[in-house]
Image (spheres, rainbow, N blue to C red):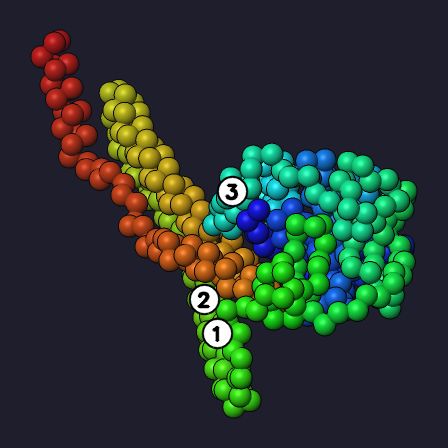
């Protein structure tokens, strides 16, 4: 079976009436659990096996408190976890449900590129390892999960008398039991094939403890080793420096967005208070002018007045619709800027550099597609009313009436 290391991160696990923080590593269909880094036998708590019976239940959300319940072992093992970030919970949900059901949920609250990556990882896993999820085995009992009793080990590891392994009782509450220590000089590597970690040769990448890795140098001097470590440390520093620069850039983006959002708000207020009033005032003046002329020629002007006034009112409505459309457009731009600003502020709270970098690159691409702030619209146009035209129309009407009589 090809091995996939899907995701790792910290989650808080409910233990009796409180929570404790644990490291979770999902490799293939097995979640390995550690008290802390590094991932060595002394820190290992055990494993949870994901199979088609696994259920991921999301609990009601609270501020910085996103819980979920994980049912494993034919849903007889119940464990409650929580994260202070919804995105972290949805990452676990995407991979766990995807491996168990062979379909990633459609309602993940994650950036589109992250969701696509989860779907691609899960699809590759099932394609290369078979359409039907393989039967997993418990490392302690070496029996399939379908045969395990409710009190069998929830989280399994190699026997060790001085460290705790997490077990599950009938109520689904995690308890601690000690096992006997086994000797060996190997180091722990995470392996999902047996349902838990195995001990290997300290320099081996293979199942056979006696295999010497191809990268292992026989007589490597201390000077060479220190040189290699120095190069690795320098590269790590370069990556850290890049992340620091990206964070500074994100802060600059926030300040720029705040200024642009303020500018949009000012522009909207100006259009609402000035343009609408000017349009209405000028339209009203024009109508009053028409009314004053119509009084001098009431025997025929009433019909003319109504026509002219209607033209001005229709024009005002059209101009108002144009101004309203402009305000709606700027409101959409305002919401877009505000949304990206909120995402940037949230991503700056991300403690893990890799998660921050992935999230920020996605937001940065959205920033590049932001539309510019619309320019202030031109002053609304009102039809020009000329007395001579109306008098001429009245004169023509009068002449027609005189000729008729």
Q: CA distance from mark 3 to mark 2?
A: 42 Å
Q: CA distance from mark 3 to mark 1?
A: 33 Å
Q: Which mark is residue 170?
A: none
Q: Position of residue 205 (x, y in %)?
A: 58, 63
User: Foreground mark, 3 or 1?
Assistant: 3
User: Foreground mark, 3 or 2?
Assistant: 3
* 1 or 2: tag closer to the N-terminus: 1
Mark 2 = which residue?
Answer: 253
Mark 1 = which residue?
Answer: 239
Q: Is residue 397 left or right of residue 337?
A: left
Residue at position x 80%, y 37% in the image = 147
Q: In terms of secondary structure, where does tag 1 sit?
A: helix
Q: Which mark is residue 128?
A: 3
Q: Position of residue 261 (x, y in %)?
A: 46, 59
Q: Is residue 197 left or right of residue 351?
A: right
Say if 304 sits above or below 132 in the image.
Answer: above
Say if 84 sits above or below 272 in the image.
Answer: below
* 3 or 1: tag closer to the N-terminus: 3
Q: How would you rate the neighbour count of disc 3 (Cα within 10 Å): few for under 14, some for 14-19, many for 20 or more?
A: few
Q: In terms of secondary structure, where does tag 3 sit?
A: helix
In what quadrant of the picture does the C terminus appear? Answer: top left
Say if 364 sits above or below 139 in the image.
Answer: below
Quadrant of the rendered structure where residue 129 is?
top right
Q: CA distance from mark 1 to mark 2?
A: 21 Å
Quadrant of the rendered structure where residue 354 is?
bottom right
Residue at position x 65%, y 64% in the image = 209
């Amino acid at each position: 079976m090809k091995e996939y290391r899907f995701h790792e991160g910290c989650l808080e696990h409910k233990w009796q009436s409180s929570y404790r923080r644990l490291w979770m590593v999902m490799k293939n269909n097995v979640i390995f659990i550690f008290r802390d880094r590094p991932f060595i036998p002394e820190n290992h708590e055990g494993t949870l096996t994901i199979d088609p019976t696994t259920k991921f239940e999301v609990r009601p959300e609270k501020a910085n408190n996103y819980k979920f319940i994980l049912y494993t072992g034919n849903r007889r093992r119940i464990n409650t976890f929580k994260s202070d970030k919804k995105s972290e919970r949805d990452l676990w949900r995407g991979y766990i449900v995807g491996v168990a059901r062979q379909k990633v949920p459609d309602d993940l609250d994650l950036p589109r590129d992250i969701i696509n990556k989860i779907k691609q990882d899960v699809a590759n896993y099932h394609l290369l390892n078979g359409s039907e999820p393989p039967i997993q085995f418990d490392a302690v009992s070496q029996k399939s999960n379908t045969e395990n009793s409710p009190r069998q080990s929830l989280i399994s590891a190699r026997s060790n008398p001085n460290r705790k392994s997490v077990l599950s009782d009938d109520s689904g509450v995690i308890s601690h039991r000690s096992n006997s220590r086994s000797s060996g000089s190997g180091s722990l590597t995470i392996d999902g094939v047996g349902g838990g970690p195995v001990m290997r040769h300290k320099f081996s990448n293979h199942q056979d403890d006696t295999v010497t890795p191809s990268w292992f140098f026989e007589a490597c001097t201390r000077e060479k080793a220190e040189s290699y470590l120095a190069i690795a440390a320098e590269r790590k520093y370069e990556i850290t420096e890049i992340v620091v620069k990206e964070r500074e850039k994100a802060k600059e983006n926030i300040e720029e967005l705040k200024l642009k959002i303020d500018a949009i708000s000012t522009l909207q207020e100006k259009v609402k208070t000035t343009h609408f009033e000017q349009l209405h005032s000028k339209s009203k003046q024009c109508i009053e002018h028409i009314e004053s002329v119509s009084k001098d020629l009431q025997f025929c002007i009433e019909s003319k007045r109504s026509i002219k006034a209607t033209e001005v009112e229709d024009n005002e409505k059209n101009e108002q619709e144009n101004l309203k459309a402009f305000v709606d457009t700027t409101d959409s731009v305002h919401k877009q800027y505000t949304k990206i600003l909120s995402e940037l502020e949230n991503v700056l709270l991300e403690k893990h550099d890799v998660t921050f970098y992935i999230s920020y690159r996605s937001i940065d691409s959205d920033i590049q597609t932001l539309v510019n702030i619309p320019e202030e619209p031109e002053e609304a146009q009102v039809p020009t009313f000329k007395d001579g035209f109306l008098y001429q129309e009245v004169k023509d009407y009068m002449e027609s009436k005189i000729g008729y009589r």
